[in-house]
Amino acid sequence: MLPKNQIAERLAAVQVRMVDAARRAGREPSSVRLVLASKTQPPEALAAAFAAGAREFGENYVQEGVIKRAALSELDIRWHLIGHLQTNKARAAVRTFSLIQTLDSERLAAALFRLHPTPLMPVLIEINLAGESSKAGISPERAEAFINSVRQQVDIQGLMAIPPPVAEDRARQFFRQLRELRDRLAARTGLTLPELSMGMTDDFEAAILEGATIVRVGRAVFGERKEG
């Protein structure tokens, strides 16, 4: 874990870059939210980021989120699930997270509805923009039918994507594709779909320039992850 003062300094630097990118895009900086991707980080690192002003954290694994939420229960954190959710973990997920960013199956939507019918569970639809077999998500072509099949079971707030690692100009093309898809889906389904979760440490500024409302940044604040 980095020293607390370094976490605070790195968080402030990311926030400055977010504000600059939003202004370059002609957007209000408040229109973009920072979710700190905190996979493998100890609760103490999250507490340091919270003390420096962070309020939203994203976990990849349900059980890790459960543990950290319990450890940091005194802090007013909004927890996001940003990793793949298996149906058998849905019960723990709805108790732990405020927003599930990775809905990608009708079966999962039905499980969330059984567990969280009133109000409906807030979700984002994960889109697999590049058709990568190694990643979850709905294909852009299937997105409209998928939304219509689950819209009575979950509160669909927008779209999320993890494009392949590419140069910034190519990343912007993927982010633009997601924004344009969101706009088409909103028009065709009548849903508002205000959220676009896209952009991470290496490309969050490009994502903001293309309309991201949520960026998921970990390494730029917490340093390199130590796996295992």
Image: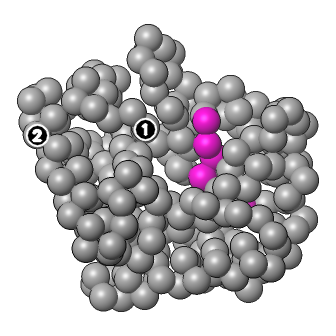
In the image shown, does 226 or 183 lie closer to the viewer?
Answer: 183
Q: Is residue 149 magenta?
A: no
The magenta stretch is: 98-104
The answer to whether residue 103 is magenta is yes
How many numbered marks appear?
2
Query: Which numbered circle lies on residue 57?
Result: 1
Badge 1 density bin: few <14, some 14–19, many ≥20, Cα 10 Å? many
The kind of residue on which mark 2 rests is: Glu
Q: Residue at x 80, y 49 (%)?
A: 154
Residue beneath the point at 58% across and 83% down: 180
| Main secondary structure along the magenta-highlighted residues | strand
- Report which quarter residue 119 is drawn in: top right
Q: Which residue is mark 2?
A: 9
Position above or below: 216 against 24? above
Q: Residue at x 25, y 58 (%)?
A: 19
Tell me what residue is drawn at x 60 percent, y 34 percent.
Answer: 97
Q: Work out whether residue 203 can be spotted.
A: no
Q: Position of residue 173 (x, y in %)?
A: 43, 87
Q: Which colouring convention does the figure follow?
A: one colour
Cβ atoms at labels 2 and 1 below 8 Å apart: no
Q: Residue furthest top?
A: 74
Left or right placement of residue 118 versus residue 91 in this view: right
Please state, as top left, top right, bottom left or bottom right, where the C terminus lies in the image. top left
Question: Within 10 angstroms of label 2, few (less than 14), some, or many (20 or more) residues?
Answer: some
With 19 as the anchor, is 103 left or right in this view? right
Instruction: Tell me the element at label 2.
Output: helix
- Name which residue type carries label 1: Phe
Tag 1 secondary structure: strand
The CA distance from mark 2 to mark 1 is 17 Å
